[in-house]
Amino acid sequence: MDAKQVVTALSALAQPTRLAIYRLLVVCGNEGMAAGQIAEKLAVSPATLSFHFRSLSHAGLIESRQAGRFVYYCANFGVMNEMLAYLTANCCAGEPCDLLNGKGE
């Protein structure tokens, strides 16, 4: 992942509703969640949700799949992991880091 892709992804997440959508989808795992369920859970109108889905999808952070008359969305964990790897590539000058192991303060 290059700097431009990271900036696009971070820009997409730099909005409260989109961040909430993404965090919810990360928790759902690969199964994802139907758009209607996301709208209900986050109290967001379908039109507004559609707008936010486009931004997250454009950044590569989410994927969608059709199942009958429902559209399910899930986090793109490959892109998430690439972004995290990019952000932490030079962490702690290459030394083992407690922050990456969940032991940081």
Image (spheres, rainbow, N blue to C red):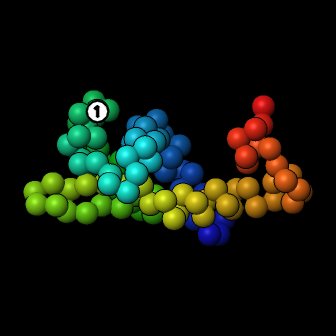
The residue sitting at the bottom extreme is: 1
Q: Quadrant of the N terminus?
A: bottom right
Q: Is residue 21 above or below residue 91?
A: above
Q: Residues within 10 Å of mark 1 (few under 14, many from 20)?
A: few
For label 1, the residue is: 41
Could you say where residue 3 lies in the image, as x and y percent from the top left? 66, 65
On the image, the x and y values in percent for residue 91 come to: 81, 54
Q: Is residue 55 visible?
A: no
Q: Amino acid at mark 1?
A: Lys
Q: Is residue 61 visible?
A: yes
Residue positioned 54% across, 57% down in the render = 80
Residue 34, percent from left and from top: 23, 48
- Check disc 1 and report its element: helix, strand or loop: helix
Q: Is residue 19 above or below residue 85?
A: above
Q: Is residue 4 above or below residue 27?
A: below
Q: Position of residue 4 (x, y in %)?
A: 61, 65
Q: Is residue 15 left or right of residue 64?
A: right
The part of the image, by quadrant, that contains residue 7 is: bottom right
**Residue drawn where x is 21% and y is 56% of the image:** 71
| Residue at horizontal 49 percent and vertical 51 percent from the top | 12
Quarter of the picture containing the C terminus is top right
Q: Tell me which residue sits at (44%, 48%) in the image.
A: 26
Q: Nearer the viewer, residue 60 or 68?
A: 68
